[in-house]
């Protein structure tokens, strides 16, 4: 069974090692640095330079369809034998959004509301970035169901940093 692990920047190395992951997605603000864990080869590491914003702001990178397509293409090449770790700065907004997007893309038989509720059960602090989800909703032709599912689970509990969690793909 394939697993998506979500964590913050400070938990990347520990999460990769504990999970046995060999693929990593990093979603950080442009210019942020990360030392890739030694378990991850460069070709199995996707870096997306996207700010955690939902509207254009000077000096920041607003997510666009090309970012979502890169995310989907990378996950499409993932063999699912080992877990995939997704992280952002706090593990609260961008990485949970990416995990939800990939769960919808890789398990298309599962309802968006079911996946969103599973996300909420796994992480009481997750507040998936709505722009990322809306872009993916359009690209995956989900007709607003992904956006509605995330709206239904609402904002997560306030925190400085989310605890690592996993989603299982059926």
Image (cartoon, rainbow, N blue to C red):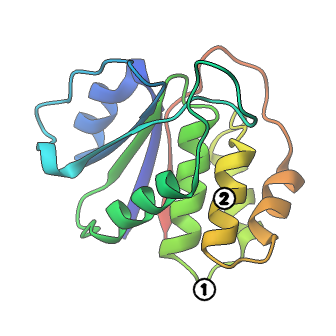
From the viewer's perspective, is 122 left or right of 120? left
Look at the image and tell me whether residue 138 can be seen. Answer: yes
Mark 2: few/some/many CA within 10 Å (<14, 14-19, 20+) = many
User: Left or right of 46: which side holds 134?
Assistant: right
View extreme (front): residue: 58
Residue toward you, 103 or 76: 76
Residue 64, percent across and down?
Answer: 58, 50
Dot 2 or dot 1, earlier in sequence: 1
Asked whether residue 21 appears in the rendered view, the answer is no
Residue 138's disc number? none
- Give residue 114's quadrant in the image: bottom right
Q: Residue furthest bottom?
A: 109
Residue drawn 29% across and 67% down? 80
- What percent of the width, then of the height, locates residue 118? 67, 58
Secondary structure type for disc 2: helix
The image quarter containing residue 125 is top right
- Relative to 71, is 97 above or below? above
Name the quadrant of the N terminus: bottom left
Question: Residue 82: where, in percent of width, then height?
Answer: 24, 59
**CA–CA distance between discs 2 and 1?**
20 Å
Q: How many marks?
A: 2
User: Is 43 on the left or on the right of 144, as rendered?
Assistant: left
The residue indicated by pointer 2 is: 135
Residue for badge 1: 109
Residue drawn at (78%, 34%) of the image: 156
Give the x, y percent position of residue 34. 29, 21
């Amino acid at each position: 069974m394939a697993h998506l692990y979500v964590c913050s920047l400070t938990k990347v190395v520990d999460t990769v090692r504990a999970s046995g992951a060999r693929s990593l997605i990093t979603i950080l603000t442009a210019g942020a640095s990360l030392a890739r864990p030694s378990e991850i080869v460069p070709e199995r590491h996707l870096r997306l330079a996207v700010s955690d914003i939902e509207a254009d702001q000077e000096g920041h990178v607003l997510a666009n369809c090309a970012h979502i397509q890169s995310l989907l293409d990378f996950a499409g090449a993932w063999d699912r034998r080992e877990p995939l770790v997704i992280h952002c700065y706090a593990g609260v907004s961008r990485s949970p959004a990416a995990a939800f997007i990939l769960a919808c893309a890789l398990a298309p038989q599962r309802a968006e509301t079911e996946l969103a509720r599973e996300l909420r059960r796994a992480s009481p602090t997750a507040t998936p970035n709505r722009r990322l989800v809306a872009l993916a909703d359009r690209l995956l032709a989900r007709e607003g169901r992904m956006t509605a599912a995330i709206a239904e689970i609402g904002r997560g509990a306030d925190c400085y940093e989310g605890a690592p969690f996993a989603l299982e793909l059926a």
